[in-house]
Image (cartoon, rainbow, N blue to C red):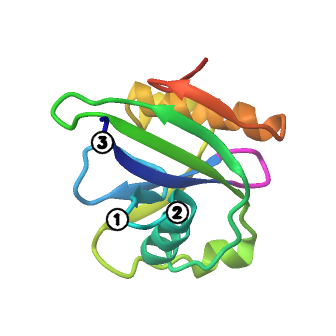
């Protein structure tokens, strides 16, 4: 029986349609806010918890945009969820606080510049999520590409 690792993150936008990326202190690349699901926790609940822990924000999380089958070498099978965080207000942006040393900065990035910040598999997953957001739908992906 498969026992994949499960993670969930939120895709936040600004008014120009760019996506929010965060810089983890323990990675060489940027990411979206989120993290691993704990035992007994739903992916959506994990997403809410991680956003609050990482950004200091209590927000409403919308629908699931993408579920991605994304096994990784040295990490095994993974199921990765991205939920719609919507558009952050200026007030919410000013309220972003890094409560621990896990994240060091945040910024908005246009879809066409994602590869300058994130691995290509994550860029594909984010673009799949952006497409689902624009159609108010959801997508199933493998290695970031919608099927």
Q: Would you place residue 44 above or below residue 134 in this image?
A: below
Within the magenta stretch, is there residue 30? no
Query: Looking at the picture, how far across and down is residue 70, in whole percent?
Result: 39, 30
Residue 39: assigned label? 1
User: Magenta stretch?
Assistant: 13-18
Residue 18 in view (yes/no): yes
**Disc 2/disc 1 C-alpha distance (Å):** 14 Å
**Disc 3/disc 1 C-alpha distance (Å):** 12 Å
The quadrant of the picture occupied by the C terminus is top right
Query: Looking at the picture, how far across and down is residue 9, in whole percent?
Result: 51, 54
Q: What residue is shown at x 84% (from left), y 34% (from top)?
A: 135
Q: In this view, does 117 lie to the left or right of 102?
A: right
Query: Looking at the picture, how far across and down is residue 94, in whole percent?
Result: 62, 78
Q: Would you place residue 42 above or below residue 129 in this image?
A: below
Please rate how many residues cluster around mark 1, counting C-alpha atoms within 10 Å: few if below 14, some from 14 to 19, many from 20. Answer: few
Please rate how many residues cluster around mark 2, counting C-alpha atoms within 10 Å: few if below 14, some from 14 to 19, many from 20. Answer: many
Residue corresponding to mark 2? 47
**Disc 3/disc 2 C-alpha distance (Å):** 20 Å
Label 2: state its secondary structure. Answer: helix
Label 3: state its secondary structure. Answer: loop
């Amino acid at each position: 029986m498969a026992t994949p690792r499960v993670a969930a993150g939120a895709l936040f936008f600004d008014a120009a349609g760019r996506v929010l990326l965060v810089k983890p202190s323990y990675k060489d690349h940027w990411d979206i806010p989120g993290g691993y699901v704990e035992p007994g926790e739903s992916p959506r609940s994990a997403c809410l918890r991680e956003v609050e822990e990482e950004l200091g924000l209590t927000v409403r999380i919308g629908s699931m945009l993408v579920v991605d089958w994304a096994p990784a070498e040295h990490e095994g099978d993974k199921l990765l969820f991205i939920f719609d965080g919507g558009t952050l207000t200026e007030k919410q942006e000013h309220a972003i606080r890094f409560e621990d040393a896990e994240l060091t900065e945040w910024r908005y990035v246009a879809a066409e510049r994602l590869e300058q910040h994130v691995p290509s598999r994550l860029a594909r997953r984010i673009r799949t999520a952006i497409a689902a957001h624009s159609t108010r739908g959801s997508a199933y992906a493998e290695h970031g590409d919608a099927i």
